[in-house]
Amino acid sequence: MLATAMALTACGNSGKSGTVRSQKAAVPAKSLPPKSEGSTGATDDVDGYLPEGRDITPADGQYSAIRNLNGPLLKALRKADKDAKRVNISFQVTSGWRSKKHQQSLLDDAIHKYGTLEKARAFVNTPEQSAHVSGKAVDIGPTDADDWLIQHGADYGLCQVYANEMWHFELRTTPGGTCPAQLTDAAG
């Protein structure tokens, strides 16, 4: 479970600089980012946990992780998913909205693994700064879906935020606009 927590992040909304229209992932990723599971107890749908072994799409509103996403983000994500399906690309949501409890669980795991809050913040943001907690961030897989979103996401206002997380997207521009330059990691 610690490895799961390390691969996840929550977002801050500061530190934008420069702009890019099309983005490339800075690091290779597994075919799917791990599901949002923390080891300290936040494993309930009420907290935004998504169960393992299920392909959860942007249309699966029965899960709080999808249902509690920011309305404009969810609308853009569903439109992008629909368009990507035309070229046989399917989105899987691996993490969306998270409760503060769930986010703290992920952060606690990261601190345990890396030894300090400062080091952990490269991978997981605090509940107060996480865009996942406000429903303004979503993690998508598999890799072909991430690649498609990196290339076409700006058409929907969706941008890859962190260079070390090709699966993490937020609304950061208007549809058809230019995405801001990526931050190095969740610490900014």
Image (cartoon, rainbow, N blue to C red):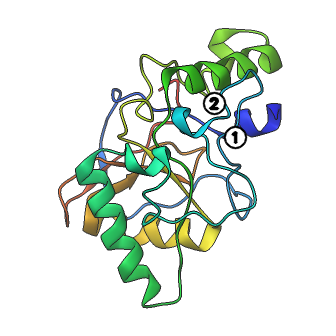
- Which numbered marker is on residue 147? none
Quickly name the residue at label 2: 123
186 vs 88: above or below: above
Residue drawn where x is 72% and y is 23% of the image: 41
For the point 74% across and 20% down, the residue is 40
| Callout 2 amino acid | Phe
Can the viewer see residue 21? no
Near mark 2 (Cα within 10 A), the count class, few <14, some 14-19 or many ≥20, is many
- Amino acid bearing label 1: Ala
Q: Is residue 172 left or right of residue 3?
A: left
Please state the horizontal and vertical placement of residue 2, each as a whole percent of the image: 81, 31
Marks 1/2 in contact by CB < 8 Å: the verdict is: yes
- How many C-alpha atoms fall within 10 Å of the one at disc 1: few (<14), some, or many (≥20)? some
Residue identified by numbered label 1: 7
Q: Earlier in the sequence, mark 1 or mark 2?
A: 1
- Residues under labels 1 and 2: Cα distance? 7 Å
Which image quarter holds the N terminus?
Answer: top right
Q: Can you say whether 128 is above or below 80 in the image?
A: above
